[in-house]
Amino acid sequence: MARPKKKIRELRAIRVNVRMTVDEYLILSQNASTLGITIPDYIRKRVTGKTLPRKRILLEDRQLFIELGRIGNNINQLTKKVHLGMKHPPMLINQLAELKNILDMLKSNIVKSDCQAD
């Protein structure tokens, strides 16, 4: 089965050539690479007023954030059960609070180290 045809407004059929100085190109290239997107995507987003990513996150950090989010989700589920009055050991509330503080500290350290790398 063939791929469905795109509407005429969705095709990128028009090409725009822009002349710029070497310095302008270097700035453009650096801005795009800092955000982790290609130069054409950067230009499209800037021209159309779409939001740009705030900053580039390294793949390792992105995976760490995903895993921390999963851990946080599990902690939230346990916390919800505690608040609903389900059976729990008395120390569970303290352990959950401690885990939440540790996760918050890890996330803030990652963001701080990422900002300092820029």
Image: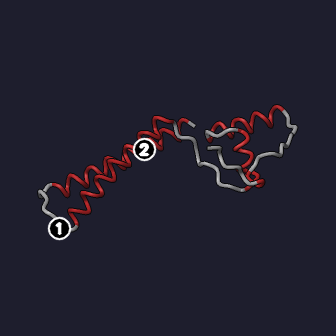
Give the residue furthest to the top: 22
5 in relation to 60, above or below: below
Residue 65 tag number: 2
Quadrant (top left, top right, bottom left, bottom right) of the N terminus: top right
Residue 85 tag number: 1
- Is 90 on the left or on the right of 22, as rendered? left
17 in relation to 82, above or below: above
Residue 81 image offset from top left, x and y in percent: 22, 62
* Viewer-closest of 116 and 54: 54
Residue 56 image offset from top left, x and y in percent: 57, 41
* Viewer-closest of 60 and 109: 60
Q: Secondary structure at mark 2?
A: helix
The residue shown at (11%, 56%) is 89
Residue 21 tag number: none
Q: Give, as a three-letter code, the residue at label 2.
A: Phe
The residue shown at (65%, 36%) is 33
Quadrant (top left, top right, bottom left, bottom right) of the C terminus: top right
First along the sequence among labels 2 and 1: 2
Which coloring applies here?
Answer: secondary structure
